Amino acid sequence: MSYHLSIDIGGTFTDLFLRDSEGGSLSVKVPSTHGDLTDGVINALDKAADTEGITRGTLLDRTGQIVHGTTIATNAILEGETAKTALLCTDGFRDTLMFRNGGRENAFEVHVDYPDPYIPRSLTYGVGERVNAEGEVVTPLNEESVIDAIDRAVERDCNAVAVSLLWAHVNPAHERRIASLIDEHAPGLNYSLSHRVNPIIREYRRTSATAIDASLKEPIASYLSRLRDRLEENGYTKEPLLITANGGVMQFDDVVELPIWSVDSGPTMLPSAGLQTTRLELETETPNVIALDMGGTSLDMSLIRGGNVSRTRDAEVADSILGIEKVDVRSIGSGGGSIAWVDEGGLLHVGPESAGSSPGPVCYGQGGERPTITDAALVLGYLSKDQQLGGEMSIDFEAAEEAIDERIADELGVSTIEAAHTIYATANQDMVTGMREVTIERGIDPREYVVCGGGGALGLHVVPLARELGVEEIILPREAGVISAIGGSYSDIRHDFSATQQTKSDTFDLDAVNETLGSLTDKSRRFLDSVGADERDRELTYYTEARYTQQAWEVEVAIPSPPFDPADVEKLVDRFHESHEATYGYRMEDQDIRFIHWRVEASARTDDQQTGAPARDTTAPESDALRGRSPAYFGTERIDVPRYHGPSLAVGRSIEGAAVIEAKNTTIVLPQDSRLEITDRGNYRILNR
Amino acid sequence: MADGTSPNVSIGDGDLEPFQMTVLSKKFEEAITVMSQSLMSSARSGVINSARDFTSAFTLYDSRQFMYDKGLPVHAANVHLIPEYTLDKFDDISAGDCFLTNSTYAGNTHHADYTLHVPVFYEGEPLFWVLNRAHQADVGAPQPTTYVADAKDIYEEGPHLPAVRIQEDYEDKEDLIRTLKLNIRAGDWQWYGDYRAQVAAVRKGEEMIQEICAEYGVELVRQFTEEWIDYGERMMEAELEKLPEAEIQHTTRHDPVPFNDAAPEGIPVTVKVKTHPDEGRISVDLTDNGENIPAGFNLSEATTIAGVYGGIFYNIDSDLPQNHGAIKRVSIEMDEGKIVGEPEPPVGTSVATTNVCDALFNAMQAVFGDLGEPYGVSEGTGGTQPHCSVVSGTDFRRDDEFYINQLIFNAGGGASCYGHDGWITYGQSNNNGVVTLESIENAEQNYPILVHQYELATDTGGAGRWRGGPGVRIELGPREDEMTAAYCNMQTAYPPQGIVGGDDGTTTEVHKRTQDGELKELPGMGYPVFEAGETLVSTMCGGGGYGDPTERDPEAVKRDVEAGLVSPKAARDSYGVVIEPAESGISLDEEKTRTLREERTEER
């Protein structure tokens, strides 16, 4: 028996998902340990070993691969615990990180502070130099100004330096020279160069990515080495893999080189989980999926279109853009803890404030006084009074009812149950609005999609959400509670390489593009060699980002493998028009196209991706699963509904709504006109009618 | 839905349930967001797709304002004027029509904003208007700019279109399209590309509203819209009840206007405001302002309204729905034929969305300072400053192709308020920072220019307990062939004023650096031409301060000195804070600071 382990450290819980060589699987949840996050990993390993009836050492000894996700980078940024970092920029442009992209969210919200730049102005040093749009040197590098800046950064006890000069992605000579000057004058000082971290146009994106990368060098290197040591002490001597922002995994050493890729490690596995689950359940390589993960504070969402995971360059962490092209995971601000309130004009709102896990919903009895979505779900009869929510505490139904009665029902002039339903319906609409914005922006029609996902709160909402979006089919994995860890278990090794090479469709520079793509291909091959990827597991996928000449934003287009011959140019143009039309609803055939960036995604499969056999007792009688009946409210009436124990439902079993299914770590509410069945693989499949 | 057992709700008289009220409001908001998103992503010109200089809105068919996307404040509270005019002029409005209005004499903001609007019919009945207003890169004015400051009347501004039916039965009217393509610079690709994106946006809004009607039924939607407007009124009423009762007034000044000798002494803008907390109302008197002038600075009715509401909305809760109900709680007295008020045809209104409009926003946001802390917002920057010039010329890299667009390097000059320093990427008072900035690299790729500096300037923000936003220093010029930069300042003679004891910001300075490095002063407004090797150098004004500078937290002053936003000298002179050089960086001398501040207090 051998194991494959995926361990994901989140803000609240550390999840472990285990697959064994005989097709079995199990999931474990332990609290995250904020003093030393690696303690949580050891605790999760112990709990998994216990469940398997073996020791920690035996478990690790039999483990072929550990895939790891961790919130450490995201947390360090959010809490300002990254390394002290200086920025070297082109003289005259010290405010790139301050200005960002401008564009205040709400023009009428005047009483707010302007957010601080990622690196303070006092640690930002202009150096004499300038390169123009074509990469020609306008002002040569003033080395004295560089040395002076390095000296000052060292004097101020900086641990790292970010170097980001204008047009360095077109001509990196000055950044390279600065790197040698740092090596010479401050050996050991960490640094990141913008043309290496994020070689794309737009100085804010490039500079922000470089600043974040530099500030993470030391914290990520020391965290990964501590984790590697602890695993080694316990007998695991192979190279663990880290989940990265681009939805793949990388070896620790590669992450240490470019630590920005460790941001959002974990949540980026949501689409991988959705993709893997739906590929098997729908028996297609190109599923269209809306992947959802709803917990206590937010609903996370990712899109998979024809088997391709949506990506973005606009993701932000703590008011700063990441700038790298990562898996697009959007957070929509509704979670089980979102607070409901009525404004002066008599309109109900849910959120954005959340009761989080402390004090938590009123029904937790931990001092929460304002009603939340969870309280509404309890009053509506979706959650059971006897259930244990969010840990060991018992549930105070009366307190939840009273809070909704006093703070919502009285204000709206409706009954308590109607008030609870208004909270529930409002939260659902908020989520649908958030989801629809993403689908529209991406130019997709949700009716052609299935919903797949997990998280503690998703089951309560998933059927009405899907219905409102026009989605007919929902698939929830049986271990839906640890959705990201499931994704990590099935992820590929992945590294992106990109370069800027501008050319227009009417004067297409075939040689330059072929040379750029050739060099990206070489880099990709060298990377795949370095991780020892087998030739048949490798895949290189090519993309360009292009736009009509005067547009400001590019559309990403998948392209055939290079090298191109003159006849291929027309194909590139056609693909652009198609993508533009699919995204924005129109094309302009008579217009020239400007190609800007080129990107290669190098990936390698990490194992055979065997899927588990059903961990269900297929002969269990129905009565084992039915746990009783209780009233639940569905908008117009209270219905007496059956409640089932999810894990006891047999394969092939079908349940008509209205019903409630208490699955592992989530409760699924089936309204009328929906049906749930247990698939051959033991997952939940729900159909809306 | 209504099953007969649910009680009616307090929110209105109909049988709309609370969750339907919420759900429907969110559905309409979603439709607006989607419209704006689609335009933002696919438009061509920088002003639309980078700067987000546009607004989407829905009105009821009778033109009452229903909802808008809270885009630009200068587009706020005035969209009803557009369908009002169209309804007055046409008696055959049909599904599939699309109207284009850019004329300030037909309810529009200024002639460079093209406002497309389509009626929304459902089951043969007209219910709504969907509007999208977007600033164009060019509108065929005599000079290559959309801000023709010297245009004394509309004949010098390019075509004025008063509700022209540009689509019928969902098809373009080709003759009209050809006319505009011909009259507008880069009309074929830039204007037409933006137009297509705008049409796609309004049609998307139309489709989404029809879907909502199909799902909920016309009756329920109708009930909802009425209750939504009532809700807006209740919210506004509650906000206005909180203000102290007072009569207050504020005057600000706009730079002299040399063109046609229009206003050699500058333009004073005065607002008189009376709060009526007992009635939950407010009234604004604008009649104490000057007569129309022969230049483009006269406000349109739309921008006069926007300035008044903008200033009020900045001072109250930002979340209330700014619909016709909310608007009803404000009464405005204005005259026809005045710079601030309704213009008298055919006077020019080309810069009606900036400049005097910014001055009006400033006056309206600052007047509340007369109520004392915590009320009021100081004056911020305004006008089309040199760092936001409309640049034009030919591009040597692209077979001398003609280019024209506005640079959106919109940082600096933010207004301050109780508890908060000035916003850094403020833009102008009329947009309050919603505009997205252009990247230097993107601009240099699209236009043959080189930017030499783009940074916040030291000691420009007005001192105060909360400091005004620093101004920006910019230097840029053409790479090979000559470049025209059109700009129009309003604060080279009169700085943004501080309030509640805060200091004024600095004034804006504009120079040309000649090929031999000499700095020559340029006029505050104009269309100077720059040869290769020459640059435009400008240090813009900083925003006004809020509150007594000697009450500013000394640590905050120290941080400003460290960041280079305030000099050690200004820390001492303006804030009474003593900063000394230290081994690594600087240190705050608390003892000397205390003594100095005590002395200052005694002096007063």
Image (spheres, coloured by chain):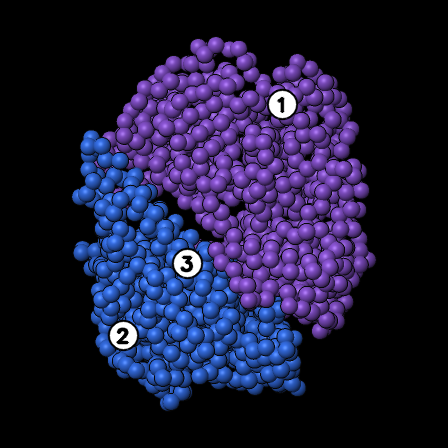
**In the rendering, which numbered label is found on residue B201?**
3
Residue A399 visible in the picture: no
Q: Secondary structure at mark 1?
A: loop
Q: Chain of mark 2?
A: B
Q: Residue at x 59, y 79 (%)?
A: B394
Q: Which chain is purple?
A: A
Q: Can residue B31 be seen at all in this image of the molecule?
A: yes
Q: Nearer the viewer, mark 3 or mark 2?
A: 3
Residue highlighted by disc 2: B341
Residue topped by disc 1: A612
Query: Would you say A237 lies left or right of B157 here?
Result: right
- To which chain does the residue with label 1 belong? A
Q: Nearer the viewer, mark 2 or mark 1?
A: 1
- Dot 2 crowding, Cα within 10 Å, few <14, some 14–19, many 20+: many
Q: Are marks 1 and 3 in contact (CB under 8 Å)?
A: no
Against A457, is B308 above or below? below
Mark 3 → mark 2, Cα distance in angstroms: 31 Å
Q: Quadrant of residue B400?
A: bottom right
Structural crowding at the residue carrying mark 3, measured as other residues with C-alpha within 10 Å and reported as few (<14), some (14–19) or many (≥20): many
Q: Residue at x 67, y 68 (%)?
A: A507
What chain does badge 3 belong to?
B
Q: CA distance from mark 2 to mark 1?
A: 74 Å
Figure chain in blue: B
Check chain identity for marks 2 and 1: say if they share one. no
Amino acid type at circle 2 is Gly
